[in-house]
Amino acid sequence: MGKYPTSPLAPAGFPDLPVIDGVRFAAAEAGVKYQGRLDVMLAEICEGASVAGAFTRSKTRSAPVLWCQENLALGPQPGKFAILVNSGNSNAFTGSNGQKAVQATADGVAAELGIHPRNVFPASTGVIGEPLPFDRITAKLAELHANLDETKGEFAARAIMTTDTFPKGAVASCDLGAPVKIAGFAKGSGMIAPDMATMLVYIFTDAKIAQPVLQALTTRTTDTTFNCITVDSDTSTSDSLVIAATGRAPMDEITSLDDPRAAVFADALHTVMLDLAHQVVRDGEGATKFVEITVKGAESEQAAKTIGLAIANSPLVKTAIAGEDPNWGRIVMAVGKSGEAADRDKLSIWFGDILVADKGWRSPDYREEDGAAYMKQAELKITTDVGVGTAQATVWTCDLTHGYISINADYRS
Amino acid sequence: MGKYPTSPLAPAGFPDLPVIDGVRFAAAEAGVKYQGRLDVMLAEICEGASVAGAFTRSKTRSAPVLWCQENLALGPQPGKFAILVNSGNSNAFTGSNGQKAVQATADGVAAELGIHPRNVFPASTGVIGEPLPFDRITAKLAELHANLDETKGEFAARAIMTTDTFPKGAVASCDLGAPVKIAGFAKGSGMIAPDMATMLVYIFTDAKIAQPVLQALTTRTTDTTFNCITVDSDTSTSDSLVIAATGRAPMDEITSLDDPRAAVFADALHTVMLDLAHQVVRDGEGATKFVEITVKGAESEQAAKTIGLAIANSPLVKTAIAGEDPNWGRIVMAVGKSGEAADRDKLSIWFGDILVADKGWRSPDYREEDGAAYMKQAELKITTDVGVGTAQATVWTCDLTHGYISINADYRS
């Protein structure tokens, strides 16, 4: 927050988040760790909403992640829902104290809003392993409650930032028999890799959609968006995506994935989630390049994604990109290390539209200066065909720069 | 070579390599890419030697690696053996031209030394994807042949360096009924990760040991040495380890793994291989810290190694070490992302002898200043007990610094 300049890859500005009927936001300065900035946000969601989620697969998941997963397993309780997020402390690896902190904040929100504690979805982001001073958060609940307002999404988006250099928001709309809006925001900058990353993502819609359908669409869309980005290959203990559909739009409920409107909604949801995922990469710690990597000709979509992430996570590929060096040999290396099938003698590589390597050999028409000129752009597309099948996948990453080292070698001390 | 200062973690000097009866070396300046430095080495090994090897598991293996693997599959041809290595160009991803280059250099060595081309073990290290100007190498074969000398191992070790800041040698001896010597050298600095790394390793011994026994001991020892180190998680297309046992020591041949002398030899071999592996890490690009990571309490040795490498490869762990930040939360994160079983509530972490985290919670006796003081050392030991079993493994790595970025963002351009 102000410590590092805004990423050169940031979008022009934060979008105008539309009001989602049934959702209200508030943010406050609780001083959890940071002083003089918004660091806690509360969202209140109306009764009858469907809530779904996607979470880190880390084996050392934080206490709030476990709580949210339990909530979803238990199913919704009567009444409203709430989301409570703090930045500055992740409440991860904090043992039984971490669970107590979650219980205390959920109970606090429940008492303040008059709802069931199991309808409260908490999240914490920041340093791991330090006790969460949850009393600083609960002390702010009355203020947050009093300030709830349906137009305050951007404040909520700002309150959950950690090393982010800009707040991340995205919107979409679609027609499901009635016009429907989707608005989301996210945070994430480092410790970004599938499954999922240090990402917190909150998405709201007025669509009327049954919880199992919403959950299925969310899981599926997470797989092609947030689970296809990587900044540094490190997976957070705290990643959470929560989506709430208030059902306030004047439409018949979508109760089945076979309803043709499910696909329409999924498209709009994909737009929002991909936009937010890209913004997380654009705010990758130290990033100066936004890189789209497409792998074609693979044995399966999963193999294509594995190869793509091997390229995207390779420190040698990422430093070459930082140095604007069209060092395609490092892409060959990364394909090879992925462990997935690839035919060395059919491998082709493109930088943008420039064919660099053609069927296992440097393209005769390729000129190094063309590759070097291409690499100077801030937005890069790298494509490889590994020559063994027809499946493909696309992943997104950023470069690895001195900025990443500077940010992470002195993050805590 | 001179471009970067010698690693602060380098050993005091290159060891005195003992003469191995039956092995001679020569090095020359062939100008493959570098000018004015040794860049090609030839080793000649006597008839009757046993030769074994270990190679990269990359799916995009270089032409020389494929050739060497074929040699071992075919079995030894009558007559002497040779090893020919150049630096500056890896002859990887060079299509059919790469195979032609290997054939031409193997044929050249065979003609020059009067041996079978399938007894020639070539290797190339350097830039990927550029045609190997093999005529510059073959033009030097007569000179190399004329200069073969049993005392020139250090020159050979220097000729195979690329971004290495120091040559790497190691020696050991043991008694197998007769005194036996082992001498080895290696190169490697970046693109270092199992299986194996941009490592070239050559080991010579006068032990008399049947090829299948030598191969089995080499494979086993590679697994606990070179396959337990990582600099940057990137796996080379060219990694090769070749070991030759000349059989010139006055001893009965070891023909079975059950021969008690096999274990004695394996111990000495382990000493040489671990020493060389550690030297590769000590010369990790930009390294300022040598880090030993031990994982205990895992479900299996493989699980322990996977967790250890997840810690060792984590950019966030590596940058914290670079910043001398005792940020043990990042170790928790890395354990979690490994995918292997770990009990968050039994997890313990030590920095050296300092108990930092005890059974899922910051140790009550841990003081941040003790951790910070420990991290200032150049040689660090990090231990974690993941609390689910009894297996353990140790891996070695270095930190991730601005030096790594500087070296790799302008390696080729």
Image (spheres, coloured by chain):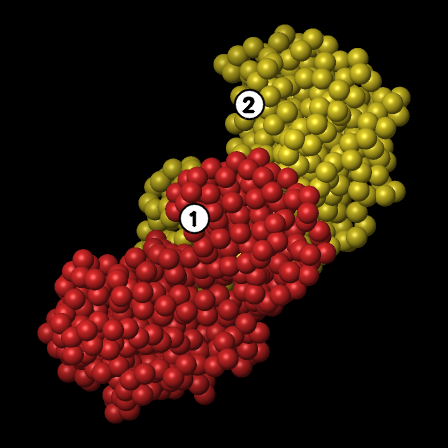
Chain colours: A yellow, B red
Q: Residue at x 72, y 29 (%)?
A: A101
Give the amino acid at mark 2.
Leu
Q: Residue at x 61, y 63 (%)?
A: B401
* Whether residue B111 is situated above or below residue A249 in the rendered picture: below
**Viewer-nearest of labels 1 and 2?**
1
Label 2: element kind: helix
Q: Which residue is mark 1?
A: B392
Q: Residue at x 53, y 21 (%)?
A: A216
**Is disc 2 surrounded by few (<14), some (14 to 19) or many (20+) residues within 10 Å?**
many
* For the residues bearing labels 1 and 2, Cβ distance under 8 angstroms: no
Name the quadrant containing residue B276.
Answer: bottom left
Q: Nearer the viewer, residue B80 or A314?
A: B80
Task: Identify the disc placed on residue A190.
Answer: none
* Whether residue B246 is situated above or below residue A87 in the rendered picture: below
Name the quadrant containing residue A147.
Answer: top right
CA separation in Å, label 1 and label 2: 41 Å
Q: Which residue is mark 2?
A: A217
Q: Nearer the viewer, residue B385 or A89?
A: B385
The picture places residue A160, in percent across and down from the top left corner, at: 75, 36
Q: Residue at x 72, y 13 (%)?
A: A116
Left or right of residue B369: residue A237: left
